[in-house]
Amino acid sequence: MFFFDPSIVVLIPAIILALWANSLVKSNYRKYKQVKNNINMTGAEVAMHILQKNGIYDVPVVAVEGELTDRYEPRKREVRLSKDIYYGETVSSVAIAAHEVGHALQHSHKYVPLQIRHAIFPVARFGSTAAFPLFFIGFLFNTPVLMNAGIIFFVTALLFQLVTLPVEFNASQRAFKQLSEGFVVDPNEMAGVKKVLNAAALTYVAAALMSLLQVIRLLVLRNMRD
């Protein structure tokens, strides 16, 4: 099966980076989840404060189950925070809540990369699902059309990952700005905020690298059939 052929070595750098990034996210999140913030505000209160400070009153902040399940839901215009972040008065809560609100600010300000990501999401989701079955069938039966279709579909997933990078980095930049301007956050806490968000950003870099190397791998396999 081509999933386990020697070309898989192409993915090793991305796999290592992804494992390291995931470990870094969890370790920083858990470390700063134990550090109480000096503004005595929960993640939910931080999120609502930033929203209201920026004149946004129609985006609710809701609690959801799970760990690190925090996200901004653009279709419903909701900031969704895991319960530890929603109710927690910690440095991790401040960092993650501010980051997710950063996406709400992007939406409100019509940030172009975010709009592009929303527009290509359905195509990218379908592409990432269909790419490997099409390529695999084409590879087994030496059908270039199917292999090419699989590669093209996977490229849409790569484009989604690439456009996600500026979206996530910009959301963190907005979070830093809001926290530094709107709160009395001491340098030690801001250092913790940066560690939490920088580690999370690294996971998106790893995902983009994985997608890029996967495309290269599929091209190598495609050329082997010529």
Image (tube, helix red, strand yellow):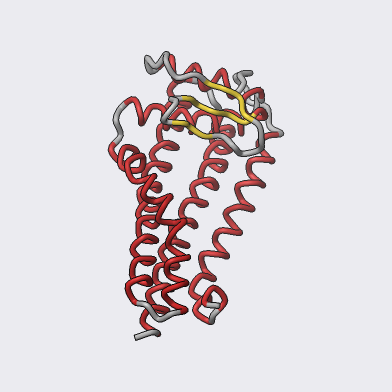
Quarter of the image that includes the C terminus: bottom left
Task: List x then y, in percent, for residue 102.
Answer: 43, 31
Residue 131 appears in which quarter of the rendering?
bottom left
Task: List x then y, in percent, for residue 149.
Answer: 34, 66
Left or right of 145 on screen, residue 86? right
Question: Is residue 144 depicted above or below 107 in this figure?
Answer: below
Question: Is residue 188 depicted above or below 17 in this figure?
Answer: above
Task: List x then y, in percent, for residue 179.
Answer: 48, 26
Q: State the residue in front, 81 or 220.
A: 220
Left or right of 16 on screen, residue 56? left
Residue drawn at x 45%, y 72% as measured from the top left: 137
Residue drawn at x 42%, y 79% as measured from the top left: 221
Q: State the residue in front, 223 or 16.
A: 223
Residue drawn at x 39%, y 61% as measured from the top left: 154
Question: Is residue 61 depicted above or below 161 in this figure?
Answer: above
Quarter of the image that includes the N terminus: bottom right
Left or right of 62 on screen, residue 167? left
Residue ranking furthest to the right: 34
Q: State the residue in front, 188 or 89.
A: 89
Residue 29 appears in which quarter of the rendering?
top right
Residue drawn at x 35%, y 43% as measured from the top left: 117
- Number of dots carrying numbers: 0
